[in-house]
Each structure stands twice: as C-alpha cells, then as structure tokens.
C-alpha cells in the first residue's frame, strides 16, 4: 500500500512538472506572438490579436492538459527532434517558420498599423468559426493518433502502427487537412487580406509535406500501402 501511494505521489509530481513546463512554453509562444503583432501594429486596440490569442491559448492549454493525462509519450514526442527526422522535413519546417512569422508581420503592418486593406467583420467572424472547427477536428485527430509527431519520421522506437480509425477513415492525413484552412482562418481573424498571401504559402508547404510524408510512409511503414489502397485520398475526399 505504501509503495502504491509513493508511486502515485511521484506520478503526480511528474505530471505537475510536465504541466508547468508546457505552460511556460505555451505562454512564451503567446508572448512572442503578441510582441510581433502589437509592437509592429503600434497599438493595443486592435481586436483581431486579442481574439486570436484567446483561441490559441484555449486550444493549446486544452491539448496539453489532455496529453499529460492521457498521452504523455505523445507530448514528449512532439517536444523533441529525433535523430531520424527526414532532412527535407527540416527544410520545410524552416520555411514554415519563416512563412508563419511573415503572416504575423504582414497582418500587423496591414490591419494593425497602416490599414492598407479593410476586411468585413462578417469574414472575421467566419475566420473565428473556421478556427474553432479546425481546432475541433485537430483535437479529434490527436485523440485518435498517438504517433502524431511534429516531425516526419518513422517512430520505430515507439512501435509505430498504421492508424485507420477516426478521421483516418476518410483521409490519410487529417492533421494537414485541418491545418491548411487553419492558417487562412488566422489571417481572416486578424482582418488582413495581405496576410492571406503567407497563409497560402503555409498551405502550399503543408501540401508538399503531405506528398513527401505519404511517399515515406508507403516505403517505410508496414501496412501503409494496404491502408492507402483502402483510403484513396490524402487530404480531400474525391479530390486528392
């Protein structure tokens, strides 16, 4: 009985440390985003970033809380870059980071400071609804796939298996299917037409990553070829 209680205490301490570490990461990212948006905009009365940061914090804190309780290994996988991450994926991730920062900068200069373009409030509301829809879909993907890494690699160390349930019954890469419209919704929330340009660049990078990752899985993950024959489409049923 004493051992059981001791193990529970250790587990609780470990969970608390994980939660604290992830909380610091989430808040640090929020501060970086706010700094880019509000400093470049030169004002705090810009509604879009406040809405975006609220939605962002709810999404990430909800994910971290769920992962610590249910899939701590997934949280660890998503927080590190293993040695067998594909070289082409490192290039894509670098370009992805540049495009994401570019989206924030362009939105801050356009909608925040100079107001080069004006977006109808109805479209911003549509962006919020789209963001929430993408987030719900993404959380469903996360709950279904315990191997959902941030990096493209075969997780032999975690005995990676082909996932065929949940959203994977409809498309082979449902995470990317949610992330592609996600970034376009961010541009809409911020109220910047020009921010749709780097948003489209992000979407293009994810389509390229989908094609390359799909090819890797066909070649290296046992059972994926058979799964791909059953589920024909990568991102959009009936299209591709």
Image (tube, rainbow, N blue to C red):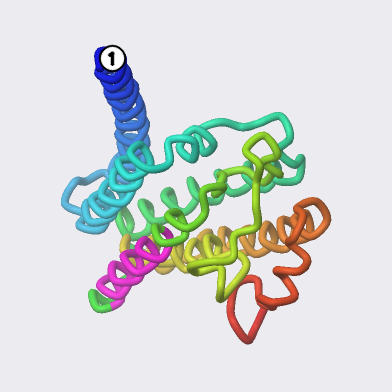
Which residue appears at 63% of the width and 86% of the height? Answer: 238
Q: What count of labels does the image hold?
A: 1
Image coords of residue 127 (percent x, y): 33, 70
Return the residue at label 1: 6
Question: Residue 18's image quarter?
Answer: top left
Image coords of residue 169 (percent x, y): 56, 73
Q: Is residue 60 left or right of residue 208?
A: left
Which residue appears at 83% of the width and 56% of the height? Answer: 219
Asked whether the viewer can see residue 195, the reply is no
**Relative depth, front residue between 46 and 97:** 97
42 to 120, vertically: above or below: above
Q: Which residues are magenta?
A: 123-138
**Relative depth, front residue between 62 and 100:** 62
Image coords of residue 11 (percent x, y): 32, 23
What is the chief secondary structure element of the magenta stretch?
A: helix
Asked whether the viewer can see residue 164, the reply is yes
């Amino acid at each position: 009985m004493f051992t059981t209680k001791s193990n529970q205490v250790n587990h609780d301490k470990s969970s608390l440390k994980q939660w604290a570490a992830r909380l610091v990461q989430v808040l640090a990212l929020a501060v970086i985003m706010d700094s880019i948006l509000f400093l470049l905009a030169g004002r705090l009365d810009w509604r879009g970033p406040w809405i975006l940061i609220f939605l962002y914090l709810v999404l990430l804190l909800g994910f971290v809380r769920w992962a610590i309780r249910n899939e701590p290994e997934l949280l660890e996988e998503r927080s590190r870059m293993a040695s067998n991450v594909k070289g082409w994926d490192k290039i894509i991730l670098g370009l992805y980071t540049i495009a994401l920062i570019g989206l924030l900068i362009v939105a801050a200069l356009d909608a925040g400071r100079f107001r080069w373009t004006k977006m109808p409030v109805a479209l911003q509301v549509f962006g919020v609804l789209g963001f929430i829809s993408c987030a719900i879909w993404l959380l469903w993907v996360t709950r279904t796939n315990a191997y959902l890494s941030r990096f493209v690699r075969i997780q032999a160390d975690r005995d990676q298996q082909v996932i065929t349930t949940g959203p994977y019954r409809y498309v082979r890469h449902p995470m990317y299917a949610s992330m592609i419209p996600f970034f376009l919704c961010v541009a809409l929330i911020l109220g910047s037409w020009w921010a749709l340009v780097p948003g489209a660049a992000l979407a293009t990078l994810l389509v390229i990553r989908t094609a390359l990752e799909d090819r890797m899985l066909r070649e290296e993950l046992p059972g994926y070829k058979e799964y791909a024959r059953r589920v024909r489409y990568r991102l959009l049923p009936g299209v591709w």
